[in-house]
Amino acid sequence: MSSNLDNGEAVALGDLTCREFVDLVTDYLEDALDKQTRARFEDHLVDCPDCPVYLRQMEAIVGAAGLLREEDLSPEVRDVLLSRFRTWRNGG
Ligand SMILES: [Zn+2]
C-alpha cells in the first residue's frame, strides 16, 4: 500500500458536506478535531445556513448533559437529521 498523499492538504480539502459536519460535531465540541479538519468544519459553518443551527442545538445538549457521545443520539434522531441534510443537498 503506497500513499500518494504528499499533497494531502490540497487533496483532502474539499468542502465539508453537511453529513460530514454532523459526523464531526461531537468531536468538535470535545475539541477532538485536528487543526485541518477544524478549519474545514468552521468554513462549513460560514457557508451553510443550517449547520450553525444544528451546532447550537448540539451545544445546548452538551451543555445540559455535560458530555455527549454519538451513541447518545438515538438512531432515529440521527436518521432524521441526515435525511434533512440529504434533502437540502438534492434540493438544487
Ligand atoms: Zn451544512
Image: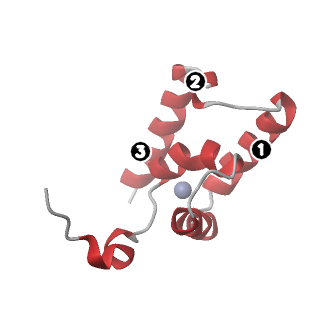
**In front here: 50 or 14?**
14
Question: Foreground residue, 3 or 68?
Answer: 3
Three-letter code for the amino acid on which mark 1 is drawn: Glu
Q: Is mark 3 within 8 Å of ligand 1?
A: no
Q: In this orientation, which residue lies closer to the viewer: 87 or 10? A: 10
Q: How is the image coloured?
A: secondary structure
Residue 58 appears in which quarter of the rendering?
Answer: top right
Residues tagged 2 and 1 counted as in contact (Cβ below 8 A): no
Residue bearing mark 3: 86
Q: CA distance from mark 1 to mark 3?
A: 22 Å
Instruction: Measure the alpha-carbon separation of dots 2 and 3.
Output: 21 Å
Q: Earlier in the sequence, mark 2 or mark 1?
A: 1
Residue 72 position (above or below residue 49): above
Could you say where residue 40 lies in the image, as x and y percent from the top left? 53, 67
Q: Say what secondary structure mark 2 lies in.
A: helix
Q: Quadrant of ligand 1?
A: bottom right
In the orientation shown, which residue stands out farthest toward the left? 1
Q: For mark 2, what is the residue?
A: 71
Lower position in the chain sequence, tag 2 or tag 3: 2
Q: Residue at x 57, y 24 (%)?
A: 71
Residue sitting at 58 percent across and 31 percent down? 70
Q: CB at mark 1 closer than 8 A to ligand 1?
A: no
Check residue 59 in the rendering and tell me which mark sits there, or answer none. 1
Residue 11 x, y percent position in the rendering: 31, 73
